[in-house]
Amino acid sequence: MGTVSVLERMGGGLVVSCQAPEGHPLRDAATIARLARCAELGGASALRINSAEDVRAVRQRTALPIIGLHKIPYAHRHLITPTLALAEDLAVAGADLIAIDLTHESPASGALVAAVHESLGVGVMADVSTQEEGLAAWEAGAEVVGTTLSGYTARQLPTPDDPDIALVGALAARGVRVVAEGRYRTAEQVRQAFEAGAWAVVVGGAITDPVAITTRLTAATPAGSR
């Protein structure tokens, strides 16, 4: 689908990130596709999917817009789709937008945004960690800017528990089409992000990771606190 159509379908909605790392009980492309279908039935406006393999599997199960990404191990975290070759694999697999890491830690730059547009004909979601990075990504032509990596770069550690709603508001106030992402776990946090000016909100593990959900709730029990 065209980028304009994708943006129209995503705006004002909930984007569900369906991912599972190696070693996780859900680490199977078919299982990720079933999670994506569940998200669609629940009213998701779009999906965020890691790897070309999973994008292909999800595309077979749903017509929702897909934000594709490819995680590359880097120091204490992962870089998000830092090369055009990785972006091309995702586009060929069926991704409608490509997520690109445009933090100060990434080798990617605004030139990659332009290359994705020109070579692949799809839009870009820039994953950033600060207002400065977000504004630079927006000026480089990214269709949407995500607060995805706020709290995860080396100089922002330790990662806080709550989402960075202040960054959402700061970017929205500058006219950026901002996607709130990162540690959103409750309906109240989603509402707060939209009130701050978010164009869309991404929720991942709070929906699609039963291990993380169980761990969080177990911590509130007498047994879990021992």
Image (cartoon, rainbow, N blue to C red):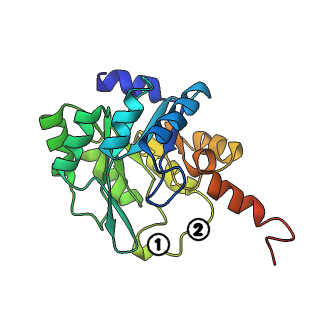
Secondary structure type for disc 2: loop
- Direction from residue 208 to residue 32 in the image, left or right: left
Residue 69 horizontal side relative to residue 44, left or right: left
Lateral position of residue 51 relative to residue 204, left or right: left
**Residue 14 location in percent, x, y?**
55, 35
Q: Which residue is mark 1?
A: 156
Q: Residue 119: name its quadrant.
A: top left
Vertical position of residue 207 compared to residue 218: above or below: above
Q: Nearer the viewer, residue 127 or 193?
A: 127
Asked if marks 2 and 1 touch (Cβ < 8 Å), the reply is: no
Dividing the picture into quadrants, the one containing residue 141 is top left
Amino acid residing under circle 1:
Gln
Q: Quadrant of the C terminus?
A: bottom right
Residue 25 screen position, x and y as percent: 54, 54
Residue drawn where x is 27% and y is 63% of the image:
106
Element type at mark 1: helix
Residue visible at 58% across and 31% down in the picture: 38
Disc 2 designates what residue? Answer: 160
Q: Quadrant of residue 113?
A: top left
Badge 1: few (under 14), some or many (20 or more) residues near its Cα, within 10 Å?
few
Could you say which is closer to the camera, residue 216 or residue 181?
216
Q: Can residue 198 be spotted in the picture? A: no
Residue 91's place in the image compared with 129, above or below, is: above
Mark 2–mark 1 distance (CA, rounded to whole Å): 9 Å
